[in-house]
Image (tube, rainbow, N blue to C red):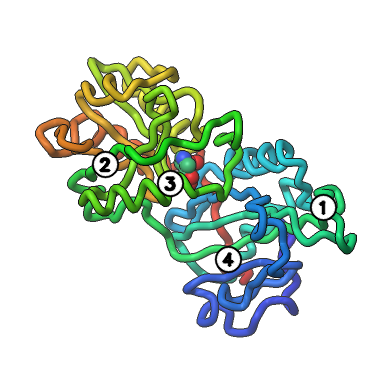
Amino acid sequence: MTTVPTDMRPRNAGANLKTGAAWMRGRVMPIGEAAIPLNDWGLIHSDITYDVVPVWDGAFFRLGLYVERFFRSMESLRLDPGMSEAAVKTVLHDLVSATGLRRAYVAMVTSRGVNAVPGSRDPRDCRNHFFAWCVPYIHVIRPDIAQSGASVHVARTVTRIPASSVDPRVKNYHWGDFTQGLFEAKDAGAETVLLLDQQGNVTEGPGFNVFSIKNKHLVTPAAGVLEGISRQTVLEIGAELGLVTETRTLPLEELLQSDEVLISTSGGGVAPITQIDDRLFSNGSPGELTTAIKERYFEWAGSPAYRTEIDYEGA
Ligand SMILES: Cc1ncc(COP(=O)(O)O)c(C=O)c1O
């Protein structure tokens, strides 16, 4: 694996970088020093894509799947990172290695960049900009809450942006719908929010996919959502545990009739949902199958088959 040249690494990297670091233009730096220009289209037009891979106990989990999805997103938006998948993996590896973080949230980002032709409104004139950053691991649902089961509010004032406008399979920063929904959820005393599509079917929440378990059927929405890597892992684990797995339309009324509800995210793996609005699931505590899936998820995260170990010695 090629490394970031040592002369580009800050001295005493472990001490400087353990709260977060970025890789920009070939240099690793403390995250507080990383910046993009104010006229970058990523900032002024949300013209940007990203992906996030978790690091568990010193190894990336399913790294190849995340980097492949990142490249699919860039292709869809006609963004060019200017490097290969292998080179992106090397950057991520060297970045995490330089921080010494053994549990980390690692983001890879490509922005449309700054328009190189003064006055041009043509996206083809922009210089695309790839960068990466990592911070200590982030949980979408706080671990203590994920342990006992989280409450979800179904948004009423906002629906998910239609997939025909912004393709949710391309990871994006168009979070206006989620943020409005989160305000609604917090005001209602719930932990997080679930958005419906314009027909009243379940989509997803800010940073997670959702699953219904009913009579040993594990169901998750097929469309209008990010095809989460954790969602894929949960579907694979579900099949391994003998559940019937289904990706299809999931109306809210059906979700509310579930035996168990769970969410999947790279920011915490699997978390039980024990309440949606006023409805309690499995008597308000994590269900048996959800717990089994969650345990298996962390066994997979520890398995050499899915891990890309980080070499911290080279940092
Ligand atoms: C909108 C949305 N849905 C679902 C997910 C879960 O995807 P993954 O399991 O790949 O983290 C995320 C993750 O950030 C997300 O932002």
Report the number of numbered marks. Answer: 4
| 3D distance between C-alphas at marks 1 and 4 | 39 Å
> Does ligand 1 reach within 8 Å of label 1's beta carbon?
no
> Label 4 sits on what residue type?
Ser
Q: At 31% across and 25% down in the image, what residue appears?
A: 252
Mark 4 → mark 2, Cα distance in angstroms: 36 Å
Q: Is residue 299 visible?
A: no
Distance between the alpha carbons at the discs numbered 2 and 1? 41 Å
> Mark 4 or mark 1, which is nearer the start of the sequence?
4
- Left or right side of 40 for 202: left
Mark in front: 3 vs 4: 3
What residue is shown with label 4?
97
**Quarter that holds the N terminus:** bottom right
Q: Position of residue 296 (x, y in %)?
A: 33, 36
The quarter of the image holding the C terminus is bottom right
Kindly report the distance in space between the C-alpha atoms of the residues bearing marks 3 and 1: 29 Å
Indicate the amino acid at tag 1.
Arg
Q: Amino acid at mark 3?
A: Phe
Check disc 2 and give the amino acid type. Answer: Val
Q: Please rate how many residues cluster around mark 4, counting C-alpha atoms within 10 Å: few if below 14, some from 14 to 19, many from 20.
A: many
Q: Position of residue 14 (x, y in %)?
A: 53, 77
Counting residues from the N terminus, which is met first, the one under dot 4 or under dot 2?
Answer: 4
Residue with the mark numbered 2 = 152
